[in-house]
Image (cartoon, coloured by chain):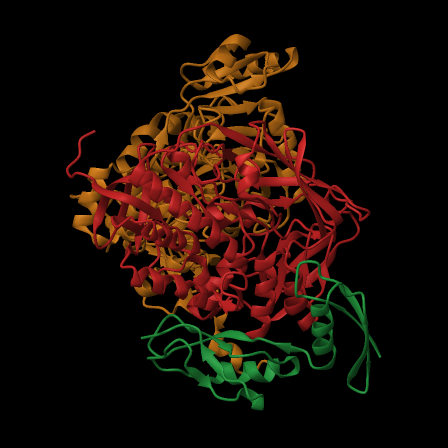
Amino acid sequence: MEQLITCINCPVGCRMTVNVENGKVVSVTGNSCKRGITYAAQECVAPMRMVTAVVPVKGRRLPLSVKTRAPIPKGSITACMHEIMALRLSPPVRMGDSVIADVCGTGVDVIATKTVD
Amino acid sequence: MKSAWTARTVDVLVVGSGPAGLAAAIAAREAGVTNLLVLEREAEMGGILKQCIHNGFGLHRFKEELTGPEYAQRDIDLVEELGIEVRCSATVLSVSAERTVTAISREHGLMRFQAGAVVLAMGCRERPRGALAIPGTRCAGVFSAGTAQKLVNLEGAMPGRRVVILGSGDIGLIMARRMTLQGAKVLACVEIMPYSSGLNRNIVQCLHDYDIPLMLNHTVVDIQGRERLTGVTVAQVDFKRQPIAGTEMHFDCDTLLLSVGLIPENELSRQAGVTMNAVTQGAVVDDALETSVPGVFACGNVLHVHDLVDFVSAESFKAGKAAARFALGGARGGRTVAVLDGEGVRGAVPQRIRLPEAGEAVEAVQLLFRPACVYENATIRVLDGDTELIRQKKRILAPGEMADITLKPDMVQRLSGKDITVQIEAGEGVCAWNS
Amino acid sequence: MPVEILIIGGGVVGCAVARELSRLDASVTLIDRADDVAEGASKANSGIVHAGFDAKPDSQKARFNVAGSRMFAGYCREVHAPFVRAGALVLAFDAEQRAHLDKLLAQGNNNGVEGLRMLEQAEVLAMEPAVNPAVLCALYAPTSGLTSPYELTCALADHAAVNGVRFQLNTEATRITRDGSGFAVETSRGVIRADVLVNCAGVFSADLHNQISPRRLSIVPRKGEYYLLDHEETPVFSRTLFQTPTKMGKGVLVSPTAHKTMVLGPTAQDTADALDVATTADALAQVREKALLTWPQMSLRTVITTFAGMRAHEVGDDFIVGETEGAPGAYEAVGIESPGLTAAPAIAQALAAQIAAAHSLTPKAAWVPAPQRPKPFADMTDEERQAACERDPAYGSLVCRCEQVTEAEVRAAIRRPVGARNIDAIKRRTRAGMGRCQGGFCSPRVMEILAEELGISPLAVTKFGGESRVVVGTIADAAKGDA
């Protein structure tokens, strides 16, 4: 199965044609460098994304900004956001603290990107 | 002028504590300035980064991708470590050519400073709907994308639920994703140009990922809704960017976000008599980021609107270092040569390079500029008068991605004294749209 | 039992009437359909205080225009509203237009306008170097002025309120019927009974009139669209510049405002929908085209915004001011389009005198002067700013950077006798949100202060009342129910 994707690694944005069979990348054309192949391989088989959001904090006007510690499967973004939006946090929270462990069974934590005293 | 109080002397005064101000202050401290003050009008440091909760910052500087608040915190931690004095909730009211700065805050009332050097790092503002004169009603529900971003990320409020975005610059793209993730439906991103001015990664991760259509060569021609927005009319535009009659389509929506341009906030700079550049809408500066007013420096988005915060920090470190040198050691003398925008180049910064004097240490000069349109396989050329100094091939050059080219120290050493020109020589690729 | 007077309409005329009536021993209430005063045409016009050469002789427009023009400077001083005696030029570019100016000059003299004279090209260009050098001559009206129509309206409302006038907003009059010797007014918030009615309802004034009078009046809403340009370091023009009037109105003007911004416009389009104040591409294009005649170097680089106002044009082409025909006890100011702003002080004075005489109303023993308006922070010297901060630390907190408006002033705008309850109302009273960034920077903070002062949730803050909520909920709400 052929997929057309745009590489996001650098401003060139190579348009690549990727052939995927049985969940494996068979060929990649249109890339200018090796990083494109790596990106294509991941993107066409199991696209991953970082998710960032804000969560209300009890007693505080400013919400807390959070992120997944690492990229999670693109297909899990919606479920991940549901878990994040259901969060009710109380201070204090330190930058880097895990606020959701293993979000949506991805094995990735959601962590605070700010400290709230 | 009568004065009930004397101005406090400060060696280096930095206006703004966004990434530019913080970097300038850090550099000034590291260059030996102890009498250093940063004035910040918001309650906390960090500038616009506070509301940029998405990631993508710091890949060049820190070799890792951070969110805006995390990137800001690196500099905030350093500022605190270095014991740099920062006054928040303090708004600068005026900067004079003699470097007298007045500011006001709840805590301190009216403050006056006499600065050895001033670093202007006020950032930029967004072009509002009014400036575009989009016809229609003046209902609630029309926001500039940055204001909407502030409402969502710093106030926890939802600006709306059915959204159309005008402008495919990075702020518009980021907000398309933001609004979608927080439960809104984003119907389209409408872009008047034939290309997006945003980064490719944002188009993929903010629009493609969520099946949000990018409508190039389109614009919003009417806004409807008596009290709250009920819809907008979008039309295709011709090569002169004028709406084409008969192509109108209607979107039912309650929110219109505008990402239609950033304008450096130079009110204070103008007051100080700084010479401005019409293309960048920021100050004219030399390679030390010094403006036409001695001892007044400018860096970051107030100088020219950046895409990458890493470049802001690099530029601002330079400005802070130069401000320190000025405050501690006095002005640089010597001649400068102009850096001109040649074919295909817009807003090259710095606009002047000082010719080094005999014996002094020479630094590289990084020129930043925007391509006038999209180029494929083009060549950046830097000329000293008619002599070519640099030829650099580039696969892609786009107006949405600030380009850079560096004159190495030995090159700067050997400058002839004629004007420098930066230009783009088109390759086989198409460049159909000139600004 | 005090006489109950109900004023319908809180525009500049209604508030001026309220202020005049507040001098008298009567019980006065003013209602308006909107969430603030000045929400109709009073906030959306050029702010020009017309000299009076343009009105037809012996018309009500001429009478009230000239009288108002003479009163205006003192009037604004009394209520602490801005007024600038800027002067005006009506430009002529050919012989035919010059002949028209001759007619205007005669007409103006007839109407009692002072100081009118013709200037030749050289004098015109000496006065206003940026005017089209092709100008032939101009009619100079030194008495023409500038004010801020919404600031004036708010100041009049405050003055009326401190002298006992009750302001009831979000109250739309829908039906008036006789009730004994008085009237019963059905409104969106219940029935109000009054002995005396004063109809100052702008575009809706004919509808209300027709409910109680055998005489038929007809208002054709006439939309006018404008550009507003930012202040430059050196103002382009110091005086109002008119082009020779056409049948449809005063033509496109180019004028500084009382706040040193610049206004271009208006157009004149008749419309069926009195509330349709949307700007249109065609009308804005017309403004641009026509303005070039006066200002060939026109640059829209500094456009801050565009807006439209709806004129209450009565088909008889004149004001109808006085007791409503066939409805004793009801008074009216119908069809108050341009020169309505200029005429307002005179109209109010005339109506109040008429009402006082007819109902034997005597002046109050003590009439409180208009509340002092503190000097705007933006206009203060450093010393004044320091003193202000010492008095009230909220002066040290800048909310609107573009117009230099402090937290103290935003709070004061909410606490005024007829105080601001929404973002646009704060904008009109303080200028916060009127500058280059059009509220981009200050609106979240203004929302917060409004919520605090009014004791409401920030979610309930509106742009101008009704359904114009700024935000639709919190991020927590979005989590419930949505996909």
Q: Quadrant of the C terminus of chain C?
A: bottom right
Q: Residue at x 56, y 18 (%)?
A: C91
Query: Residue shown at 52%/39% (left/top)?
Result: B350
Q: Is residue B143 above or below residue A117?
A: above
Front residue of B374/C114: it is B374
Nearer the observer, C413 or C366: C413
In the image: residue C157, left or right of residue C237: left
Chain colored red: B
Res C483 visible: no
Q: Does residue B365 appear to the left or right of C407 in the view shown?
A: right
Tell me: residue C178, above or below residue A7.
above
What hue does chain C carry in this figure? Answer: orange
- Taking the view exactly as shown, the residue that stands out farthest to the right is A1
Along the line of sight, which residue is nearer the eye, A100 or C118? A100
Chain assigned green: A
Residue C252 in the image: x percent, y percent?
58, 30
- Which residue is pictured at 32% across the width and 42% down the height? B93
State the image coordinates of residue B134 (x, y, percent, origin top left): 61, 48
Q: Position of residue C449 (x, y in %)?
A: 33, 60
Looking at the image, residue A33 lies above or below residue A20: above
Among the 4 quarters of the image, the one containing residue C218 = top right
Q: Residue furthest front?
A: B359
- Is residue B278 something that shows in the picture? yes
Residue drawn 57% across the image and 91% down it: A105
Q: Quadrant of the N terminus of chain C?
A: bottom left
Counting from the top left corner in percent of width and height, residue B114 is at 25, 39
Q: Left of C306 or right of it: where is B317?
A: left
Q: Nearer the viewer, residue B279 or C213?
A: B279
